[in-house]
Image (tube, rainbow, N blue to C red):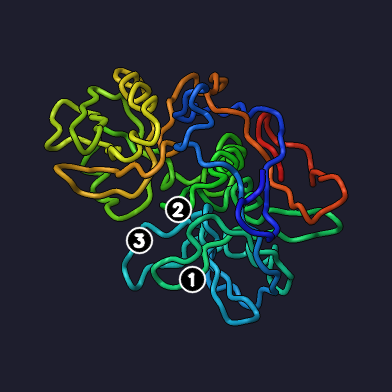
Amino acid sequence: MRVAGNWKRSICVAGIAALALPLALLALPSAAQGPHAAPCTLQAGETRAVVPIIDAETVRLDDDREVRLIGALAPRSPDMRPDAAAWPPEQQAEAALRELVLGNSVELAYAQARRDRYGRLLAHLFLNRNGQRLWVQGELLSNGHARAYGLPGSFQCIAELLAHEQVAREAGTGLWANAAYAPQRAFRTREILRQRNTYQIVEGRVVHVATTKSRTYLNFGRDWRSDFTAGIGARLIKKDPDLATTLASLEGKRVEVRGWIEYRNGPFIEVEDPSQIAIVEDRTHPKSIVPKGPSLSSEKSAPPHKRKRPAKKPGAVDL
């Protein structure tokens, strides 16, 4: 698959084995190629050197631009007090990023959105190490130094990001060994609200699915005025009407929703992409309903792609 409309190189998809994720991403196989399933196609950018590491998800290039590693959210301390002690998961993530990229040349690759509101580049980073091509976000995720996420215009390759995250999550390594990053229980609304404006995974059973003109709501309690709710805007459903049927089928199912916690008549997560929702099936060997997960490769690279090591778990692929 190529980026249409110009001559520039792209980071494109190459088929691999299906991803057997312990959580079934919300996507019907028949709608796998629909607009709500962002394809794993990135626009290749320039190659620059990484000078300093700013934090566990941000680096500065040798041309003085800052890059935020989109798709890999670094751990932050839940203690927001000014005199809070250093947070070990954050320190470990920053050390891992430093070991990977500091002083090395990296190739930038972009989704649709290229900058955040602070002017930082939103990019995926790739580097060559001992003749092997490494995806920096994938390395951080599979070693438990980040959680997978997306922003509007930057959900490309989210299935691959989640697959790498799942390696660490299943093994309980990195931040997944820390109770601060365990899924929040949907019925514990006060605890969830204490995490307001932070990125969380919330798990619970969907009591009712309600649809209005502007939004579909997944209600995790009987009182929508106070219980946890996830909202999916009508624009997502308009892109793929099959999504409405999928959402309706979630009633009575145990579901995970990931995103930023807001307050709207109780704790709330705005769903910007269906990948933020997962059905919690058999916790050890669930049946995934995700389409095949492609890997990333570069049209510039002539030699066949080599894996840097075997996948740690079935279905998680090292790019």
Q: Residue at x 67, y 42 (%)?
A: 13
Which residue bears the numbered disc 3? 79
Q: Amino acid at mark 3?
A: Asp
Callout 3 secondary element: loop
Q: Amino acid at mark 2?
A: Gly
Query: Does residue 243 appear in this view?
Result: yes
Residue 221: x %, y % from top left: 20, 28
Neighbours of disc 2 within 10 Å: few (<14), some (14-19), many (20+): few
Which residue bears the numbered disc 1? 120
Q: Residue at x 47, y 62 (%)?
A: 87
Vertical order, 210 against 259 (above or below)? above
In the rendered structure, the answer to whether residue 27 lies left or right of residue 19 reads left
* Foreground of the two, 15 or 9: 9
Kindly report which numbered mark, 2 or 3, lies closer to the viewer in this rendering.
2
Residue 84: x %, y % from top left: 37, 68
Q: Residue at x 34, y 18 (%)?
A: 249
Which residue bears the numbered disc 2? 153
Q: Amino acid at mark 1?
A: Arg
Count of all numbered marks drawn on residues in the image: 3
Q: In the rendered view of the protein, which quadrant contains the N terminus? A: top right
Callout 2 secondary element: loop
Q: Distance from label 2 to label 3 (Cα)? A: 30 Å
Asked whether the residues under the numbered discs 2 and 1 touch, taking CB atoms below 8 Å apart as contact, a structural biologist would say no
Asked whether the residues under the numbered discs 1 and 3 touch, taking CB atoms below 8 Å apart as contact, a structural biologist would say no
Kindly report which numbered mark, 2 or 1, lies closer to the viewer in this rendering.
2
* Foreground of the two, 7 or 53: 7
Q: Distance from label 1 to label 3 (Cα)? A: 25 Å
Q: Residue at x 32, y 28 (%)?
A: 204
